[in-house]
Image (spheres, grey):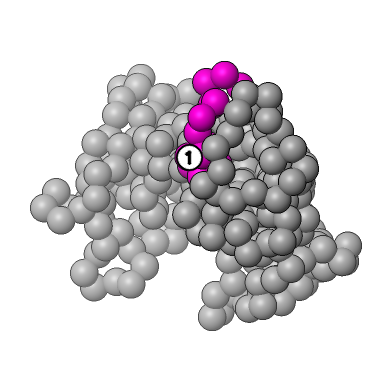
Amino acid sequence: MKRTIQYKIGILEDGLTVKQFLKRKHYSGQNLVQLKKYEQGILINNMPAYVIHHLKEGDILTVNIWEEKVSEKIPPVPLPLHIVYEDEDLMVLDKAADMPVHPSMNNYENSLANGLAWYFSSQGVPFIFRCVNRLDRDTTGLTIIAKHMVSSSILSVMASRREIKREYLAIVNGTGLPPSGTVNAPLGRKPDSAIMRMVDFQNGEPSVTHYRVLKETNGCSLLSLHLETGRTHQIRVHMQYLGHPIIGDFLYNPDMTLIHRQALHSCRLEFSHPITGKPMLFTSPMPEDMRQALL
């Protein structure tokens, strides 16, 4: 993976060192270490420079990224991918159900990562898998993939600062919820399970989910949900905690009467591009199996 990024230094950056400037752009320390290893990783006005070099207004700072390694433990497999958007720095994909994001012991060759490994290997492009917002195996919808180490670092900082706005659709059991509300309940591991999570007010991590009721039908409620935090199984456990678990959830509500997977869909992503700063907005319609469950 090769990428060249250029910055024109303005009056507000005059006098900063290269390191200070790139840190303000959310380059990680590991990014800087790697860039220093490249022969022309950092250039100022087309001349090699050190990270301690002081910048001047009008300078052109060039960052050259060369990534030749691949994710060796992710075998390329030709799997269908729904690519919503792609540029030199990131991809947005619309993930199908029954597809883990990353290979695991029992799902070694059917993950989103396997499909992307094939996608890039068929182009002769080295690729390291870096997923920004992971989705559960049976959760459908939009997910962001960083294409190199710098975009990954910047997007990770954005995610930690809650600058990536995420909206989900979920169908839950029952009706009668208030029109909108917030679940503020910390989450932790369930003691007798390696997978399941639970509300844990003593030892859990802060977890906040906002919801809005969109529709009530067929004994169910369709909700729009916004996450402030991104804990494992957060929406699934918070809805169970409210007494309105997601239908089809094999862990927290194993009733497959209306649908054969958890009815949870990542329908909207909004964030600023990690390199250009351009506003980005992506939406995905509700899948057919969730539509049928509401009939």
Residue 161 picture location, percent across and down: 40, 36
Task: Look at the picture and state if 33 lies above or below 213.
Answer: below
What's the residue type where badge 1 is placed?
A: Gln
Answer left or right for 123 relative to 184: right
- Of residues 217 and 110, the one drawn nearer to the viewer in this rendering: 110
Residue 133 picture location, percent across and down: 53, 48
The residue tagged 1 is 20
Sort mark 1 into few (<14), some (14-19) or many (20+) by Cα contacts within 10 Å: some
Region of the chain picked out in magenta, as a range: 10-23
- Of residues 2 and 183, the one drawn nearer to the viewer in this rendering: 2
User: Which of the 4 quarters of the picture holds residue 260?
Assistant: bottom right
Local secondary structure at mark 1:
helix
If the image is split into quadrants, where does the C terminus sit?
top right
Residue 88 picture location, percent across and down: 76, 45
For image coordinates 57% across by 19% down, the residue present is 11
User: Which of the 4 quarters of the picture holds residue 213?
Assistant: top left
Task: Look at the picture and state if 216 lies above or below 102.
Answer: above
- Main SS of the magenta part reads helix
Magenta stretch containing residue 22, yes or no? Answer: yes
If the image is split into quadrants, where does the N terminus sit?
bottom right
The answer to whether residue 291 is seen in the rendering is no
For image coordinates 33% across by 72% down, the residue present is 194
Answer left or right for 290 relative to 60: left
Residue 67 picture location, percent across and down: 71, 63
